[in-house]
Image: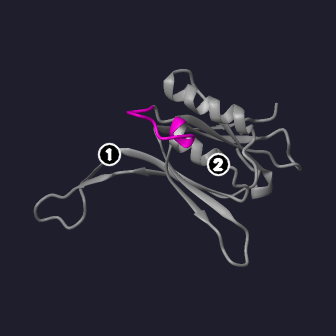
Amino acid sequence: MATTVYHGADGTISVAVDSGPAGDAAKTVADTFSLTPVGRCTGVTVNVTNDVKAFHELGQRFATDLRPGNINVSGSIQRAYVNGALLRLMLGEAGDSRPAGAFVGPQFNLSLEMKNPADPDNPASITVMGVQISAWNYTLPEDDFVMENVDFRALWVKTEEKKAN
């Protein structure tokens, strides 16, 4: 039974890549900007939705059956260290110059690791697989920290909780 609780300070975020054209495009950015771990992040959100469909029979006000539908994975990350890395993870080679034609969009895995210092033998992780950044925003406030924010979509998500022996 899981009893460890986590705080934002217990977490780290890393970018990992799979082989292939989209993974290679992400690897170039991850290596250039040392995105293991991704630093200065706050407000990380991962959303998983299941489009549950309700079946209603004539004459019944309550549903008589629920069916799972499409599962969608999305999220966002806020980052206070703006160096172009997250924008390049969205644009790939288009982050340097405008390509003449079509280009590969980077795809990567986002690993969120949690380890409570008071209980280091029971870490937990969430790995968001097949991530592509769908939006990048840059905020330059008058009297606060400069922040970038990215929204992402992903193929699927997996969780892992390691139990102490």
Q: Secondary structure at mark 2?
A: loop
What's the magenta region? 93-103
Residue of label 2: 84
- Left or right of 77? Residue 71 is left
Please tell me which of labels 1 and 2 falls first in the chain.
1
Inter-mark Cα distance, 1 to 2: 37 Å
Which amino acid, by three-letter code, is at mark 1?
Gly
In the rendered image, residue 131, in percent from the top left (x then y), is placed at 52, 40
Membership of 143 in magenta stretch: no
Q: Is residue 121 above or below residue 75?
A: above
- The residue most toward the right is 118
- Left or right of 95? Residue 71 is left
- The residue most toward the bottom is 143
In the rendered image, residue 128, in percent from the top left (x then y), is placed at 56, 40
Q: Secondary structure at mark 1?
A: loop
Residue of label 1: 69
User: Looking at the image, can residue 156 be seen?
Assistant: yes
- Nearer to us of marks 1 and 2 is 2
Q: Nearer the viewer, residue 104 or 61?
A: 104
User: Looking at the image, can residue 7 be seen?
Assistant: no
Q: Quadrant of the N terminus?
A: top right
- Left or right of 30? Residue 56 is left
Q: Is residue 88 above or below residue 59?
A: above
In the rendered structure, are the residues bearing label 1 and label 2 in contact, judged by CB atoms less than 8 Å apart?
Answer: no
Q: Nearer the viewer, residue 97 or 121?
A: 97
